[in-house]
Image: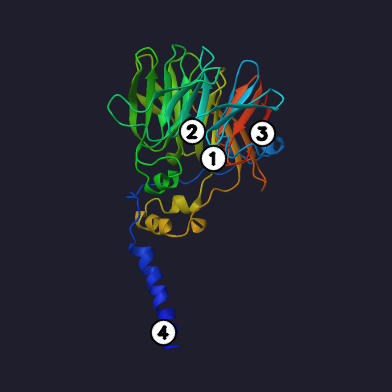
Amino acid sequence: MLKILQFILLFPALCLFYLLVWPVEIDPVAWDAPIPPAMEGNFAKNNFLKDVEILGLNDGIGPEDVAIDDSGNMYAGYDDGRIIKYDKTGNRMGIFVETNGRPLGMRFDLDGNLIVADAIRGLIKVDMQGTLTVLSTESDDGIPLGFTDDLDIANDGKIYFSDASTRYGIGEDRLDLMEHRPNGRLVVYNPETKQTTTLLDSLYFANGVAMSPDGAFVLFNETYMYRVQKYWIKGEKAGTSEIVIDNLPGFPDNISSNGKGIYWIALFTVRNLVVDSTADKPFFRKMILRMPESMQPQPEPYGFALGIDGDGNVIYNLQDSSHDAYSPITSVKEKNKVLYFGSLTYPGFARINAPE
């Protein structure tokens, strides 16, 4: 009885010791999270996304991005490395390729090859026969690609892509979030020279990448800063960057251009009170990581996508806050007036007619 009593008295102290001093992987820094914008005006709640059509249901988990070829066939990349091909009606045509990695952002180049940002294998190319070629696994400065995330392709064939984090890999993004150090970068691959060059580093989880139609600039998302930046490729500002839209109401994931001046931003979820309120308290963020994952901040089920112009003005605001919303949305692409959505964890991808 005495031993039981001693254990009961000692257990809270052991738990407190664990929460306060047990080693964790991260080395967090303090930062000032902006107050989230109100869900009104440009961000007013609506249910536009409630009627999305789910495709490829239960064919796999996490079709994070969807690529569409000129015939309307769809290609979805799943968490087990498979990229499955579907016809334009949504019927499964079979496995297009197995990357043996984790395919994320995908685009077709001008020659009909599928270019894939694979979080594990790097930047890869798949021809229409399903032959896979690894294009790049590190930049020319010798830094390995740690978390190849999203991409877009310029008219001259150069591939602009994000390396979300050189410190944490796929499945460790929660660590990157809680540490909040600038571990990401924007990179370009030149298929003629086969060189991979870092354009910008010190980015906070570099994510979506989208070229402007004229190739003058590329937009990219910094997920953990809630913002979109513009990197100038041409003109007098070439080689410089600037913020296009800041303090978004959610975590921006992928971004894509519709080729007509609209850039679709996938918002993984809305802002999290715990994440924002502990931004300037790195010690508390360490404590949170010591807790069971089920007790750590979780993404709220919330379907959310925005359409902005090249200057960051919000043109479209698409949402679904219902408990069974298609979420988290990690990619949005427009093709022939249809929006296609991917998700990191949902067992299917989705589509809906684009708003007028």
Establish if 284 lies above or below 221. Answer: below
Image quadrant in which the N terminus is located = bottom left
Residue 156 at what x, y percent from top left?
44, 11
User: Mark 3: which amino acid?
Assistant: Gly
Work out whether residue 106 or residue 1 is closer to the camera in this orientation and state it: 1
User: Mark 1: which amino acid?
Assistant: Phe
- Residue mark closest to the camera, 1 vs 4: 4
Q: Are discs 2 and 1 less than 8 Å apart at CB?
A: no
- Mark 1 to mark 3 CA distance (whole Å): 20 Å
Q: Is residue 318 left or right of residue 190?
A: right
Instruction: Return the residue at label 4.
Output: 3
Q: Is residue 167 left or right of residue 109?
A: left
- Residue mark closest to the camera, 1 vs 3: 3
- Residue mark closest to the camera, 2 vs 1: 2
> Of helix, strand and loop, which one carries label 4?
helix
- Residue mark closest to the camera, 4 vs 2: 2
Instruction: Return the residue at label 1.
Output: 268
Instruction: Return the residue at label 3.
Output: 56
- If you read the primary sequence from the N terminus, does the residue marked by circle 3 or circle 2 appear first? 3
- Mark 4 to mark 2 CA distance (whole Å): 53 Å
Specify the quadrant of the image occupied by residue 41: top right
User: Mark 4: which amino acid?
Assistant: Lys
